[in-house]
Amino acid sequence: MGGHLPPELARARRAVLDTVRATAPAGRPAVVLVACSGGADSLALAAATAFWSRAGKLRAGAIVVDHGLQPGSADVASAAAGQLRGLGLDPVLIRRVEPAGATEAHARTARYAAFERALADTSADAVLLGHTLDDQAEQVLLGLARGSGTRSLAGMPAARGPYLRPLLGLRRTDTEAICAHEGLDYWVDPTNADTTVLRNRIRRELLPGLDDVLGPGLAEALARTATLARRDADFLDDVADAALARVLRSAPGSVPVVLDLAGLRALDGAILSRVLRTAVVLCGAPAPDFERTEALARLVHGGKSAGPIQLDGHAHATRHRAGTHPGSARAVIAIDGPGSAPAASLWQS
């Protein structure tokens, strides 16, 4: 630690301060928790955040989540916590969680539940996450693989609720350089070498291969794509929310969600698909995939069948003639939530 300030560390410090200030409460310094796994990214984030904590620009603690999925995980968590305390972060919480399964999704769910409890326990304003530009590039490629549209290509936001990602403009090599300068001993997760996991295969094989073919700078280009896609997706979602309010014919919060058919048919396809997906989610069912959303759009625009369109979570959608759905004098689409039975007598033939 000490000596000439590396440009990577200067950028990380500036990114932390700018990100926290953008969402900080008025009238007092923000209180934040750095989520730390012991890896290079989160330790570098902790070092940059601790600088501003010492300077009085914010107050910073940390949370280390031990998923207990690997031998020695408690030792890794303890070692990370010791380095965080050495940086001056306070409090430093270690939380042991028990994921419902061994997948990345199970671990993420358990981790975020621990974050929520830590926010409540400490009255912190935000949790800082150590995702980098490399993570963002990987997320965009995962979105391309899923074929899920603009929102999927938008990657991870810099801020979502209390969760902030200050390092999305830094590379993984930058965080390693910061740790070296600060004398921090980071942990390398051995599961990152498991190329049966799609994200690891993208990280270790696909991105380097694309760099070889397309030239350097691909990760930065993918991150720019995420930024542009997020702007577009945010705008389209705002337009879709306004359109949903216009075509909604059921009481807010009630199920089924009833939508005016003429109003739906007047919508552009990009807005219609968003309105339909949101309506399904409002019923308590998972957001439909591309095929189910296309089926819902066909239901809107007519055809021999008026449904039901079966959706995930045992939900379904049907088209009704004018006056045949309770309380509606116009033709509608009704999306019923999980557990409801299709009303066959109301189907349009």
Image (cartoon, grey):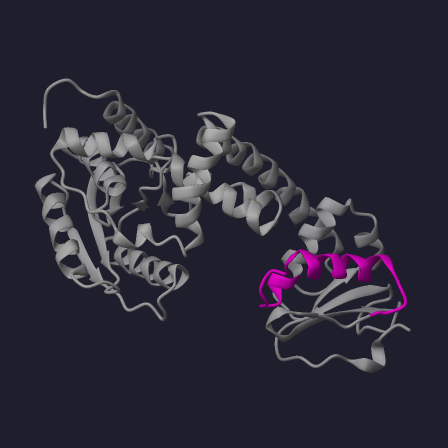
Q: Is residue 285 magenta?
A: yes
Q: Which image quarter: residue 120?
A: bottom left
Residue 116: percent from left, percent from top: 32, 58
Q: Residue furthest top?
A: 4
Query: Which stretch is magenta?
Result: 280-306
Pick the front one: 207 or 49: 207
In the rendered view, would you say 16 is above or below 300? above
Residue 180: percent from left, percent from top: 16, 32
Q: Residue at x 58, y 68 (%)?
A: 284
Pick the front one: 86 or 195: 195
Residue 287: percent from left, percent from top: 60, 60
- Considering the image in quadrants, where does the C terminus appear? bottom right
Pick the front one: 209 or 48: 209
In the rendered view, would you say 292 is above or below 145? below
Q: Residue at x 81, y 81 (%)?
A: 344
Q: Residue at x 51, y 28 (%)?
A: 214
Relative side of 229 to 318, left or right: left
In the rendered view, would you say 325 is above or below 286? below
In the rendered view, would you say 265 is above or below 251? above
Residue 57 at least partly seen: no
Residue 80 at least partly seen: yes
